[in-house]
Amino acid sequence: MSIIETNFGTRVDPNRIALGSASNITKQGAFFVFSLRVESDDVREYAFTSRDRAVAMRKVLISHMANKITEDMVKKVNG
């Protein structure tokens, strides 16, 4: 767990923030679908024919999102 302290003194966990930005996997017709909120106005939806692929890709995208959040927090703190 990598908890980051912001410049306001608040401690945040980027992994939990990233996990909260991804929706659960749902079945819509022949596809397994989930969405990922990248920014407040940028929501991306992903669809897969296999549930295993959807689960694996969701996990990968959440880790990428956590890395992005970490980099953004470090940039804000360091100026």
Image (spheres, helix red, strand yellow):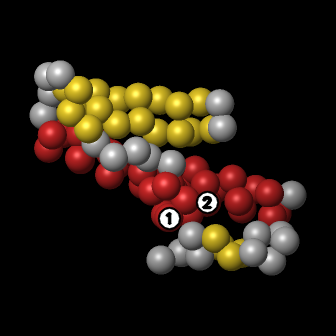
Q: For the residue carrying disc 2, how many other residues have a C-alpha within 10 Å: few (<14), some (14-19), or many (20+)?
A: some
Q: CA distance from mark 1 to mark 2?
A: 12 Å
Residue shown at the point (82%, 63%) measured from the top left: 78
- Which quarter shows the C terminus? bottom right
Residue 34 location (% of width, % of height): 34, 37
Q: Earlier in the sequence, mark 1 or mark 2?
A: 1
Residue 75 location (% of width, % of height): 76, 56
Q: Which residue is mark 1?
A: 16
Left or right of residue 40, residue 59 in this image: left
Q: Which mark is residue 55?
A: none
Left or right of residue 49, residue 65 in this image: right
Residue 37 in view here: yes
Residue 33 location (% of width, % of height): 29, 32
Q: Nearer the viewer, mark 1 or mark 2?
A: 1
Residue 48 in view here: no
Q: Which residue is mark 2?
A: 70
Q: Quadrant of residue 29?
A: top left
Residue shown at the point (59%, 30%) measured from the top left: 42
Task: Name the amino acid, label 1.
Answer: Arg
Residue 72 location (% of width, % of height): 69, 53
Q: Is residue 35 above or below residue 30?
A: below
Task: Name the amino acid, label 2.
Answer: Thr
Element at label 1: helix
Residue shown at the point (45%, 56%) measured from the top left: 19
Q: Are marks 1 and 2 in contact (CB under 8 Å)?
A: no
Q: Is residue 48 above or below residue 74?
A: above
Residue shown at the point (23%, 47%) measured from the top left: 55
Element at label 2: helix
**Which is nearer the eye, 16 or 5?**
16
Left or right of residue 66, residue 8 in this image: right
Direction top: furthest residue: 29
